[in-house]
Image: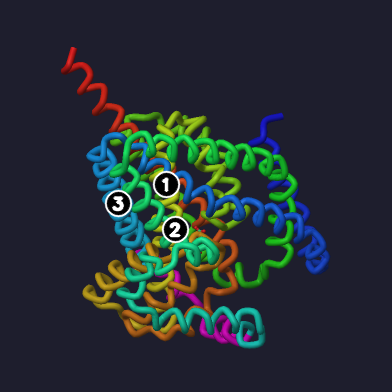
Amino acid sequence: MKLHTRILLGLLAGVICGTLLAWFKIGAVASYLQPVGAIFIKLLKMITIPLIMVSIMGASAGFSDLKKLKRIAMKTIVFFLASTIIAVSLGILASNAFKPGHGLDPLKKQQIMADIQADAHWQKQLATSAAAQKKTISAFLLDMIPTNPFTALATGDMLGVITFSLLLGLACTLIDPNKKQKIVDLLDAVNDALIALVKAVMKLAPLAVFTLITVAIAQFGFHFLWSLLGYCLLAIGVMMLFLFAYYSLAIALLGRFNPITFFKAMSSVGLLAFSTSSSNAVLPENMISCEQKLGIDKRSAAFILPLGATINMSGTAIYQGVSVVFIAQVFGLALTFQQQLLIILTATLAAVGTAGIPGIGIVTLAMVLGSVGIPAQGIGLIIGVERILDMCRTVINVLGDSATALIVDQSEKRRETRKASKNT
Ligand code: ASP
């Protein structure tokens, strides 16, 4: 049986098992399963940071044509930013059109807030969100440059690791070509070993997905889902629309590639993203699938995907757009056109600053709320359904990276074919 089918079966078994545990109110039993999923995620994360360093450094040192690297970087960043801006705008538009916050009964609102206040776990989350509100944009930009690359590696500071690896890789192109080749060969060999390790870890995926989903559903408060059904359905609906309409169109028109082939090839990556809620954890498998199933050039994938896992969060952007307007509606605050433009700007920056780990989108949401004067306490309203929305937005975040890698790679390949035919 193919790995992707086994992962899907694990997911379905997890949904059934988790629902039964929640139904019989014995969700706590699921905690015994927690270690299996946790081990799997830790193993993947253990590989992520060295893989980013080795692959980005190898890719930037190995590009013999620096102009090509610059072109790829430009195309990638422009597409990431455009997707994020469109994603937030779509989220805001949908919330304005369907007004999920207007239908929320004031009694239900009080009940949700009271439940959150009584829950120590959510209180801790709220405190983190309120603290995040204080982080300035310039602090985000400064964070890109690590003062000590080893600290960045040790603390898992992705943006810091990317900056350092990229610069060191570029510096390799300035040294004696023989020495540079030795570095590139070494990085290639380490890269292959890391990929072999990922493949071994992936054998655990079906069982790990089963436990992750069982635990998530068993511990998930279904009563929150019912009270916020309109908001959840709207957020998930916009995410699906974005994934299947926007990215399909972009893949077909800009990438000139069949979107159905893309989604089929990337289905196991999507399932993993859904189960782990972490772009970083899925990165190694995303790199392998992009290269082996979509035929994306190794160097392009090595450059675009880690960058995407760090700064391209279109799913998170949709979530933030829908959530800010929803919270404003529940609080009875009318947002002006200028305020909505400000939301697009801050949500784009917040999505860029969101790390690819579970539950960070709701923390950076505080920054967006703060930009238009909505109290961070509004997050309390939606915190109960955070888990399920995190799972969904991570799928869009991860597949958005794969789609971008494919589009940029296809455009580079077309360019090379045109050049080759001109020369003949
Ligand atoms: N969990 C998301 C990711 O890893 C980030 C978020 O919380 O929005 O892509």
Is residue 110 shown in magenta?
yes
For marks 1 and 3, give the CA distance.
15 Å
Amino acid at the residue labelled 1:
Ile
**Marker disc for residue 290:** none
Q: Earlier in the sequence, mark 2 or mark 3?
A: 3
For marks 2 and 3, give the CA distance.
18 Å
Residue 314 in sight in this render? no
Residue plotted at (79% across, 59% down)? 33
Q: Give yes or no for contact between labels 1 and 3 (Cβ–Cβ under 8 Å).
A: no
Q: Quadrant of the C terminus?
A: top left
Q: Position of residue 171 (x, y in %)?
A: 32, 48
Q: Secondary structure at mark 3?
A: helix
Density class for disc 1 (Cα within 10 Å; few <14, some 14-19, many ≥20) is many
Q: Which mark is in front, 2 or 3?
A: 2
Under 8 Å from ligand 1: the CB of mark 3? no
Density class for disc 3 (Cα within 10 Å; few <14, some 14-19, many ≥20) is some
Amino acid at the residue labelled 3:
Ile
Q: Is residue 142 left or right of residue 150?
A: left
Q: Quadrant of the N terminus?
A: top right
Density class for disc 2 (Cα within 10 Å; few <14, some 14-19, many ≥20) is many
Q: Earlier in the sequence, mark 1 or mark 3?
A: 1
Q: Give the labeled residue for mark 1.
A: 56
Q: Give the labeled residue for mark 2.
A: 161
Q: Which residues are magenta?
A: 96-114
Of all residues shown, which one is farthest toward the left?
Answer: 422
Q: Give the labeled residue for mark 3.
A: 77
